[in-house]
Amino acid sequence: MSDTRIGRRTLLGAAGLGALGTTLSYGPARAQKAYNPPASLIDAARKEGRITYYTAAFAEVEQETINLFNKRFPFVRVEMVRAPGGQLITRVKTEAAANKLTADVIDHSDRGLMKGIEDLFADYAPPNADDYIPDVLISPKLWPRITPGWCVAYNSELVKNPPKTWMDLTNAAAYKPGTIAQVIAPSGGTTWTRIMFERQVLGENYWAAQAATKPALYPSGAPLSDALVRGEVEIAPLVYNVIYTKQRDGAPVQTFFPPEGIPIVPYATGIPKTAKSPNAAKLFLDWSMSDEGQIHSIKDHGNLTSLKTTPFNPPGFDPKTAKLWVPKFDEFEKLRDVWIPEWNKIYGYRQ
């Protein structure tokens, strides 16, 4: 065995490093809980009649969610403002400083950026707050309405010996250079979560072993998923919601959730103190956090959930054996500027 391959002893030794993050599992299955908001909230939301919704998520995906929300509550018009993560936070800070923040709901994939503006948000908790995993919360004001999770995907027309674990992605003997691809570590908080998982759970040598396969590197998940479908690369770790719709619509790809763990990336969503339509905002967020909203997120968009028990299982997902993993927030912030340059050096990536 070469010095870049990972043996059982290294993997077992990494279990202690995994304590830096939190390994979670879903509880026993339960029946879906109906979302029936109180008449007083419906009446108040009806009077307000609209919300302005700031989000860093994909506009097309969020518009589907808005449309479904409006099937239940057609009297609330949702005006969506979509911007990339950094730009969105800059806009929020700029508007807040000028006392001109127009958002009624702010939704973001980077919990660290949202934690940094926590004071802008009103106290809020959904009616089913106790149903959520406490470890994913960074603030009692901010809630994970969306929870993407990582999987491994492969082109089923090209790969005859598919991997079955994260560790299989280090098998340079089984896969030719360039067969495996991945998103670069500096691409954002979602990928940084996976990078942390690899080092803390799979072992300090994992990066070197994986880099030995000479993976193709991509700037983000969208072009990588397209390349996988076209057969330009054959295997790739991907956020499940990036590849799910392609698989659902018949693309030649298969996915699996590796047994060593599933890094999850809970979003942070809250209602600003300055919201002009706080009741309509609460109705939207309460519905999003309900079983009904979470099932839509899982079934239609390929997310997982931060609920303690999942009300719906995506294809190939077994909640009895799935090991969710979320980084400890202080480590997520503290280690980023130290570990990403190390990753860049190991993988030969220059920014």
Image (cartoon, rainbow, N blue to C red):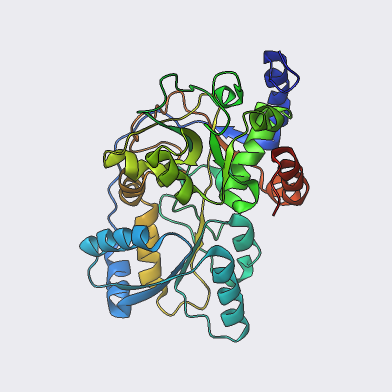
Position of the C terminus, as image quadrant, is: bottom right
Task: List x then y, in percent, for residue 76.
Answer: 28, 72
Left or right side of 195 for 296? left
Left or right side of 33 for 189? right
The image shows residue 74, relative to residue 33, as above or below, that is below
Task: List x then y, in percent, for residue 148.
Answer: 47, 45
Q: Residue at x 54, y 37 (%)?
A: 181
Asked which quadrant contains residue 203, the reply is top right
Q: Residue at x 49, y 40 (%)?
A: 238
* 36 vs 180, nearest the viewer: 180
Asked which quadrant contains residue 121, the reply is bottom right
Left or right side of 233 for 117? right
Q: Residue at x 51, y 24 (%)?
A: 259
* 205 vs 159, nearest the viewer: 159
Q: Is residue 304 visible?
A: no
Q: Residue at x 53, y 51 (%)?
A: 220
Task: List x then y, in percent, for residue 61.
Answer: 35, 57
Q: Is residue 186 visible?
A: yes
Task: List x then y, in percent, for residue 296.
Answer: 31, 49
Position of the N terminus, as image quadrant, is: top right
